[in-house]
Amino acid sequence: MASSDTATLLEDAADRIADVSRADLQIILRRAALRLRNAGAVSMEDDIEDALRDLAGELGMMRNDMIRFIVREWMEQNTYLPVHDLDEDGEVDGNA
């Protein structure tokens, strides 16, 4: 089942919550939970996994957070996402 199908089922159930049987609601919620649980699983080749683990360890991040960070940085660098602007009045660490 595609994620859009699961989303449609959830939306339909929310729209007619009084009419949905308990068993049907349990099935829909279990499917949604399974999709959420498996959403973070991205498998990589061994050399990439090693590099991700090492880099995440150096930066004190978890593997999935590191993947999200790398993808965001790549998308910003390649103009698929807008670059985060720094707040001029915000606090910074370090010396200039």
Image (cartoon, rainbow, N blue to C red):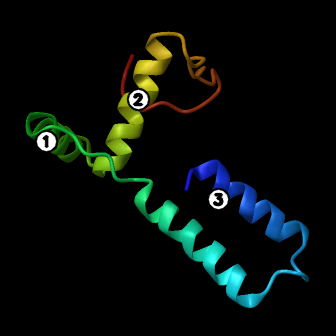
Q: Is residue 18 left or right of residue 22?
A: right
Q: Which mark is residue 54?
A: 1
Which class describes the residues within 10 Å of circle 2: few (<14), some (14-19), or many (20+)? Answer: few
Q: Is residue 68 left or right of residue 27?
A: left
User: Which numbered mark, 3 or 2, is in the foreground of this view?
Assistant: 3
User: Which numbered mark, 3 or 1, is in the foreground of this view?
Assistant: 3
Residue at (60% x, 20% y) in the render: 85
Which residue is situated farthest in the bottom direction here? 22
Number of numbered tags placed on the structure image: 3
Secondary structure under tag 3 reads helix
Q: Quadrant of residue 38?
A: bottom left
Q: Mark 2 belongs to which amino acid?
A: Val
Q: Earlier in the sequence, mark 2 or mark 1?
A: 1
Q: In the rendered image, which quarter contains the N terminus? A: bottom right
Q: List the residue tagged with mark 2.
A: 71
Q: In the rendered image, which quarter contains the C terminus? A: top left
Residue at (65% x, 49% y) in the render: 4
